[in-house]
Structure formats: structure tokens, C-alpha cells
Amino acid sequence: MTIPALIPAFHWLLAFHVVSFTAWMAGMFYLPRLYVYHCQTVPGTAESERFKVMEVKLLRLIINPAMISTWLFGILLMLTPGAVNWHAAWWWSKFTCVILMSGFHAFLSRWRRDFLNDRNTRSERFYRIANEIPTVLFVIIVFSVVA
């Protein structure tokens, strides 16, 4: 199903999709790094509480809205006639990675709740490794679309 009325808005939809995706990725790169630093604090201290505020604001004010708008504009692009070649491998590679990125986003949200309740059981090393996941997915997404 496509919506021909979206054709004139294609470039605007694409621009908003790219801006939304960029904001989403910025947050996805930064939040696991905050978790690395949060692991270095003692629960209940002022420093730990400051990280909790930073994490919740980053997730609620930047990452969540950016993910939602990325999906919204992406779906509108999918509904634009001629925007997607459904038989091309790049499309399925990108879509798979976006699904995986959304899943990782859910994990970040869950981990934030653990920190919020002073129940984090994961190590600093765990979050350092997790910090690389959005980078790998980002590279695959960009190369899928551009190359």
C-alpha cells in the first residue's frame, strides 16, 4: 500500500527522518557511556543521583522522541510510492538493523530502571561492550542505504 499524496513531501520526509535518526543515534551512543560512569559511583550518593537525572532526561526528552519520530517518518517514507524497492537487499538489511536498534533501546530503558532503583548488577565492562552495539548497527544501516 502506498499513498501517492506523499510524493511531493518526499524530500521533507527524508530530511526529518535523517534528523530524527541522527538525534536517536546521538542518544544511543551517549546513554551506555553514562552507565559506564554511573557504575563508578556509590548508590545513594549525590553523584549517583545526578547520573539518574541525566539518564532519565536523556532517555525521555531526546532518545524516546527521536526513536518515535524516526519510525514515524520512516513509515511515511515506506508509504511513499517509489521510495522503497522491496526486493532490494539494502532495504531488508536496514530494516533488520532498525528492529535490532529498537530492541537495544528497550534494553537501555530497562537498565536505566535498574540504576534508578539502585539495582544495577552489571559491570562497567558490560556497559563498555554494550556501548559498541549502536555503533555497529549504525554503520550497517548507513552503508546499507548509501552503498
Image (spheres, grey):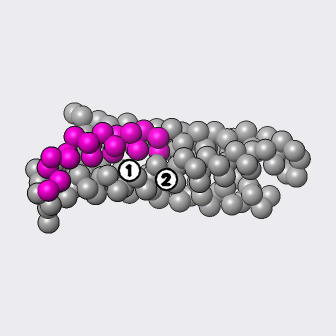
What secondary structure is the magenta-colored segment mainly? Answer: helix
Q: Quadrant of residue 37?
A: top right
Instruction: Report whether residue 11 is seen.
Output: yes
Q: Secondary structure at mark 1?
A: helix
State the quadrant of the N terminus. bottom left
Residues packed near mark 2 inside 10 Å, few (<14), some (14 to 19) or many (20 plus): some
Residues packed near mark 1 inside 10 Å, few (<14), some (14 to 19) or many (20 plus): many
Name the residue at 49% across, 53% down. Answer: 65
State the quadrant of the C terminus. top left
Range covered by the magenta-colored residues: 5-24
Name the residue at 22% across, 40% down. Answer: 11
Rendering coords of residue 133 (x, y %): 49, 44
Question: Is residue 66 shown left or right of residue 44?
Answer: left
Q: Secondary structure at mark 2?
A: helix
Asked if 145 appears above or below 49 in the picture, the reply is above
Question: Is residue 45 shown left or right of residue 74?
Answer: right
Indicate which disc residue 70 carries.
Answer: 1
Instruction: Report whether residue 85 is seen.
Output: no
Asked if 133 appears above or below 87 in the picture, the reply is above
Indicate which disc residue 117 carries.
Answer: none
Question: Is residue 91 shown left or right of residue 65?
Answer: left
Name the residue at 54% across, 47% down. Answer: 62
Q: Name the residue tied to disc 2.
A: 65
Name the residue at 38% across, 50% down. Answer: 70
Amino acid identity at mark 1 = Thr
Q: How many marks?
A: 2
**Residue at mark 1 to residue at mark 2: CA–CA distance:** 8 Å
Rendering coords of residue 109 (x, y %): 60, 58
- Residue 15 magenta: yes
Amino acid identity at mark 2 = Pro
